[in-house]
Every structure is written in structure tokens, then in C-alpha cells.
Image: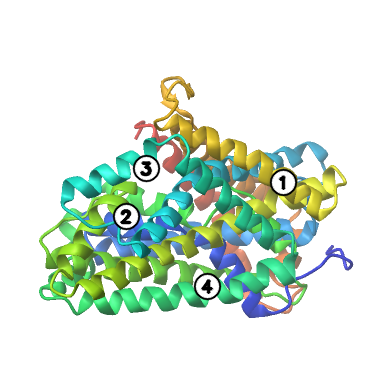
């Protein structure tokens, strides 16, 4: 039962934008477009849509049910809905996972902010070797990236301490429209370049000959990870949902926004890349090495336009990163305030300090202090591996088992249907999906990551 004294989001649009902001991040901009381009264009996008319907949306609804029912932090929510305290470890794992992600994610976010300032100063321009060296020097520097990572976490902190309505919801209502507006401008600029339509065709033309079992697994994995399943983020945000919030509709709307922004990112990247004959790769090298080269070449005849596009692009990245770090920070903040009985401000300060330490160490492990490593991996790569390949799939798998098999069906039905007022016809499909399709799908994703299948 929802805690009537707990603060809630103030509006439906606030719920959608805040929760969508937690899902929309840098991965939408560098991972999805490249995977779509390599795995059959719109054939991959179609597979991704199917996997989102079969795996992503049911997983979101499952976390929503746990969060709204518990009306508390993730640890307590999992304990309450199961009636067993020890199931709270799933929520606690999500809290730890989110703090680790915020630690290394802040490093990349800090790079984005540094590039934004460097773009404004006109420093991200030169030949290909200069741009490559610029990124190498930044990522291996002992001070600059660490300072930028901490500053980004502190910026996130000042949103969180303002609370759910005055901080998270208000920020989402401003940042998400700004992100969308910047993305539309960049898409228009990219698609009007000479030869840009080849890039559009590359992304959107279906090539079913490339669809293999690996491509299907890629689509499944992207559907799972893109929506922040397993981090306790959705569970935490759902604890601020009202009883009137339609969980199914909200999940579908959030998934649509996530997919739409990912496809728009492809329409921003591929037309520009094809206009100058570059086939973009994925990961940090795409946004910090490849794309600066692309923008410089594509708008070489109009240096002022290239200058503005570069600034807008890194502003877009910084906004996308911020919408994600806000949700990651909130998970730990509300956990400490409710379980350790700190004030919201004290809990936020504690998470800011912890994640700043994580961020500094992760940054140093990439160059300045390579000895900060575990099992031959830099701490940055270790955090990435542990969270992305182990903790998220395990958290998602256990959540599906809890909602599908542990909690009484009538409790799940009441939450799913808002006590019989909405979506009653879809419940049978949902319960079958969360019991069978989601656990099996997550296990397949998990095994695929380690090359077992």
C-alpha cells in the first residue's frame, strides 16, 4: 500500500520526463546508432522494438509495481512487497550498483563538459591526429578529468537536495525539452549536408541479410540496458508515483521516448559521417575523436556553423548525462535518508562524497595511476564490467522472479490494474511474460555477454 505521507511527483508529464530522463543517456547517442548501423539498419530497429515490448516494458512495469507498492527506498520496497526482509538485498544491490555507475559515468560526463568548454574556446579543431591526441591527453591527465567528474557530481547534488518536486521533477521539465530541442537542431543540420541521405538510408533501410542470432541478442541486450533495468532507479522513481498513475501507459510512453531519442541520435550521426566518408565506430572514441573530425570536415566551408554545431553537440551530451546522473544519485540519497535516518541533505552529501571518490579513482585508473586496477582491469573498466555485465542482469532476473513467482498474484494484479480500474485485459499477458519471457531472456543476455552462447 502506498505511503500517503510520501512526497509524489506533481504531474503526469513530470513522471514521464523524469523517468525517461533516467533512461536517456550517453548510451543512446553512441551505442544504439552504431548497433543499428552494423546490425541491419531498420531491421535491427524492428527487432529492438519487439524486444522492448517483450522484455523492456514488462521489466519496467515490474520495477514500477515494487516501487509504488513499497513507497520507499529500493531495499525496503523489495522487503515490503515480498514480506521477507532478506529479499531487500536485491534493492540494496541496486543501490550499490547505481553508486558505482555514477562513479565511472561521471568521468565520461566530465569529459563531455570539458569538451563543451573547449569547443566554446575553439580548442577542439585541428587535424585528425591533434583531435586524437587532445582526447588521449585529457583522459590520461591526473587533474582535469577528475575535477570535471567531481564538478558534475556536485551539479547533480544541487538538483537532488531540492527534493522530488523542486529538484528532480523541475529539472526534468527543463532538461528533457532542451535535450530534444538540441537534438532536433543537430539532426536538421546533419541531414542537410551534401550526401547526407546515404547516411539516412544506411540507418533506416532494412537489411535482413544481416539479421543473425547475434543481432537478436544485441537487440535484447540493448532493450534491457537502455531502460535502466536492474539499477533500482525505476523502483525508486515509482515510489513517488501516485495511486492514479497508470503504470502500463507510463512504461510504454517512457520506452517510446527512449527509442525515439536513440533513432534521432542515429539521424544526427550517420548523415554527417557519410557526408565526409567516415563510418563511425562506437564508444567514447565516437563522440570525442570521430565526431569532432566529422563536424570539422562537414562544415569546413562554414567554420562559424561548425563552431556552433560542436558547442550544441557537447551541450546535448552534457544534458543527456545529467538526466541520468540525477536518477543514479537519488537512489542512494533516499536509501541513506530512510535506512540510516539521515536528512535528505545529509544523505545527498554522503552520496556525493562517495561517488566523487569513485569518480576520482576511476579517472586516475585510466592514465595517471594505472596501478588502480582489479584483475588486470582499470577500476573504470572493472566498475563498468561488474555493473553492466553482472549486477544489472542479476538484479533484473531476480526482480522478474519476485514479481512473477514470489509475490501473490492478487497483489501484482492490484498494482498493475490500479485496483481494477485500468489495463485489466493485459494482465494475463504481463504475468506470463514476467514469469517466463523476461527471466529466460535475461539469462540468455547474461550468457551471451560471456560468450557461452
Q: Nearer the viewer, mark 4 or mark 2?
A: 2
Q: Which mark is residue 287?
A: 2
What element does badge 4 sit on?
Answer: helix
Quarter of the image containing the C terminus?
top left
Q: CA distance from mark 2 to mark 3?
A: 14 Å
Q: Nearer the viewer, mark 4 or mark 1?
A: 4
Please name the residue shown 10% across and 60% down the image. 277
- Disc 3 crowd rating (10 Å Cα; few below 14, some 14-19, many 20+) is some
* Residue corresponding to mark 4: 176
Q: Position of residue 82 (x, y in %)?
A: 78, 47
Quarter of the image containing the N terminus?
bottom right
Apparent side of residue 327 relative to residue 294 in the rendered image (left or right): right
Q: Position of residue 63 (x, y in %)?
A: 65, 56
Apparent side of residue 315 relative to residue 360 in the rendered image (left or right): left
Q: Is residue 272 visible?
A: yes
Q: Mark 1 and mark 4 in contact (Cβ < 8 Å)?
A: no
Q: Nearer the viewer, mark 2 or mark 1?
A: 2
* Residue corresponding to mark 3: 138
- Disc 2 crowd rating (10 Å Cα; few below 14, some 14-19, many 20+) is many
Q: Position of residue 121 (x, y in %)?
A: 35, 61
- N-terminal-most mark, 3 or 1: 3
Please name the residue shown 16% across and 52% down the image. 127
- N-terminal-most mark, 4 or 1: 4
- Disc 1 crowd rating (10 Å Cα; few below 14, some 14-19, many 20+) is few
Q: How did the renderer colour the structure?
A: rainbow
What element does badge 2 sit on?
Answer: helix
* Residue corresponding to mark 1: 406
Between 96 and 419, the residue placed more toward the observer is 96
What element does badge 1 sit on?
Answer: helix
Q: Position of residue 32 (x, y in %)?
A: 34, 58
Q: Nearer the viewer, mark 3 or mark 4?
A: 3
Q: Is residue 248 visible?
A: no
Amino acid at each position: 500500500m502506498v505511503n500517503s505521507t510520501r512526497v509524489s511527483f506533481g504531474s503526469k508529464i513530470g513522471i514521464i520526463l523524469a523517468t525517461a530522463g533516467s533512461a536517456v543517456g550517453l548510451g543512446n547517442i553512441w551505442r544504439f546508432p552504431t548497433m543499428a548501423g552494423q546490425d541491419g539498419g531498420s531491421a535491427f530497429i524492428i527487432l529492438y522494438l519487439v524486444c522492448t515490448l517483450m522484455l523492456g516494458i514488462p521489466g519496467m512495469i515490474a520495477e514500477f509495481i515494487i516501487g509504488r507498492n513499497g513507497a520507499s527506498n529500493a531495499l525496503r520496497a523489495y522487503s515490503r512487497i515480498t514480506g521477507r526482509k532478506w529479499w531487500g538485498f536485491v534493492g540494496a544491490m541496486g543501490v550499490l550498483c547505481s553508486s558505482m555507475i555514477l562513479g565511472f559515468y561521471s568521468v565520461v560526463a566530465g569529459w563531455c563538459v570539458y569538451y563543451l568548454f573547449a569547443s566554446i574556446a575553439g580548442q577542439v579543431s585541428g587535424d585528425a591526429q591533434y583531435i586524437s591526441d587532445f582526447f588521449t591527453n585529457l583522459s590520461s591527465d591526473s587533474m582535469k578529468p577528475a575535477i570535471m567528474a567531481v564538478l558534475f557530481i556536485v551539479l547533480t547534488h544541487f538538483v537532488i537536495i531540492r527534493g522530488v518536486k523542486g529538484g528532480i521533477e523541475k529539472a526534468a521539465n527543463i532538461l528533457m525539452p532542451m535535450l530534444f530541442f538540441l537534438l532536433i537542431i543537430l539532426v536538421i543540420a546533419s541531414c542537410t549536408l551534401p550526401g547526407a541521405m546515404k547516411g539516412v538510408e544506411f540507418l533506416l533501410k532494412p537489411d535482413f541479410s544481416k539479421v543473425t542470432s547475434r543481432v537478436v541478442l544485441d537487440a535484447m541486450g540493448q532493450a534491457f540496458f537502455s531502460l535502466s533495468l536492474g539499477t533500482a532507479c525505476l523502483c525508486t522513481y515509482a515510489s513517488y508515483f501516485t495511486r492514479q498513475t497508470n503504470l502500463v501507459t507510463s512504461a510504454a510512453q517512457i520506452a517510446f521516448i527512449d527509442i525515439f531519442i536513440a533513432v534521432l541520435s542515429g539521424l544526427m550521426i550517420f548523415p554527417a559521417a557519410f557526408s565526409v566518408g567516415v563510418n563511425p565506430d562506437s564508444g567514447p572514441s565516437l563522440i570525442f575523436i570521430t565526431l569532432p573530425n566529422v563536424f570539422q570536415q562537414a562544415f569546413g566551408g562554414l567554420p562559424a556553423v561548425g563552431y556552433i554545431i560542436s558547442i550544441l553537440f557537447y551541450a546535448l551530451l552534457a544534458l543527456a548525462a545529467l538526466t541520468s546522473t540525477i536518477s543514479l544519485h537519488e537512489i542512494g540519497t533516499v536509501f541513506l535518508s530512510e535506512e540510516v535516518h539521515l536528512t535528505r541533505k545529509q544523505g545527498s552529501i554522503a552520496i556525493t562524497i562517495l561517488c566523487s571518490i569513485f569518480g576520482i579513482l576511476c579517472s586516475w585508473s585510466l592514465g595517471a595511476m594505472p596501478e588502480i586496477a582489479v584483475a588486470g582491469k582499470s577500476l573504470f573498466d572493472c566498475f563498468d564490467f561488474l555493473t553492466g555485465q553482472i549486477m544489472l542482469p542479476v538484479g533484473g532476473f531476480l526482480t522478474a522472479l519476485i514479481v512473477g513467482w514470489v509475490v501473490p498474484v492478487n497483489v501484482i494484479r492490484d498494482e498493475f490494474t490500479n485496483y481494477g480500474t485500468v489495463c485489466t485485459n493485459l494482465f494475463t499477458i504481463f504475468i506470463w511474460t514476467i514469469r517466463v519471457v523476461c527471466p529466460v531472456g535475461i539469462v540468455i543476455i547474461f550468457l551471451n555477454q560471456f560468450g557461452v552462447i
